Amino acid sequence: MVQKAKIKVLLTGASGFIGKNFLELAPKYIEIIAVYNKSDLEKFVKDKRLKNVKLYKCDLTNKEDTRRLAENVGAEIDNCIYLAGNVNIPLSIKNPSEDLKSNVIGLINFIESFSKIKKFIYMSSAAVYEGNKGIVTTKSMLSPYIPYSISKLTAEHYVNYFYNTGKIDSYIILRFGGAYGLYSERKFVSQLVRDILQNKKTIKVYGDGTNIVNLMYVKDTVKSLLACMRSKKSNLICNLGQDNMTITQLVNRAANIFDKKVKIKYTPRRQDQKYINFKLKVDFNRIFNFEPDYSFESGIREFASLMENEN
């Protein structure tokens, strides 16, 4: 039997929702340097018996911490998947400087600490299209106004800057719609599935239900990141995601999967949240010859099964 060659990747944001799924689902011949800050990731790695994962605790917003990280793992990186940063939109509105520090300063500190990053995969957000209506592509005009969206777009510009300075050999920027799956306890979809499984008859949503979401099952998200690592394509920005649907459609589709009837209770919009009026035109599948393994329905079914098994 021919053994696969070892591949090394440095993963930031390893203790987050997508990060944990990547650690668990990535092939074991991939050696992962998992960078995290606040979570108890040691227990997760031990419980999952992830012997291909080496942990480094580092505050990326601290220059001295990132300098020590580079000293420990080596000044040159073959592959980096950058998931770190603030994902809390209300926090970005309440404290824009903290959001900027997490999403931009941390990124700058990290890249500057290394002499070379050969492939840099940056998980941006479809939130950069904020303010647009209708279908959006990577050629759409960008003028976001919520701090989170602004900082993600700014980070994209810095990735390009460091490519032009030679710090990064090649990059892929993913404008991601969003994901659902295990380890996302606080996300709306997780609570929705939980409520449906518990036979709750009324589902509460903020706003009038017309807010648009684009969601991908996290297993396909991990698969897409692995596709980026393996591909020779470089220096591009693309849209990653799956189905565009309104919140009302999301609730009804999820309920129908389990043959449940629910009533939606619409409540006033929250000022500290973003409301999307655009539909993401996904070009990732074409560019990377990628085919998701899960539809929305099959992803929700498996997610629900995994949630029940955890309880």
Image: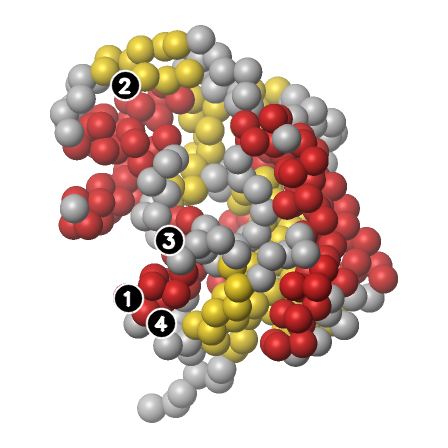
Mark identifier at residue 203: 2
Q: Tell which tag, 3 or 4, sits nearer the viewer.
A: 4
* Rendered location of residue 275, percent (x, y): 53, 20
Q: Amino acid at mark 3?
A: Lys
Instruction: Report the residue at 61% width, 20% height from top.
Output: 133
Relative to the observer, which residue lies in front, 57 or 202? 57
Q: Is residue 168 left or right of residue 198?
A: right
SS at mark 4?
Answer: loop
Which of label 2 and label 1 is nearer to you? 1
Q: Are marks 4 and 2 in contact (CB under 8 Å)?
A: no
Q: Is residue 141 visible?
A: yes
At which x and y percent is residue 111?
A: 72, 61
Q: CA distance from mark 4 to mark 1?
A: 8 Å
Q: Is residue 67 above or below residue 174?
A: below
Label 1 element class: helix
Q: Secondary structure at mark 3?
A: helix
For the residues marked 1 and 3, what is the alpha-carbon distance in whole angstroms? 20 Å
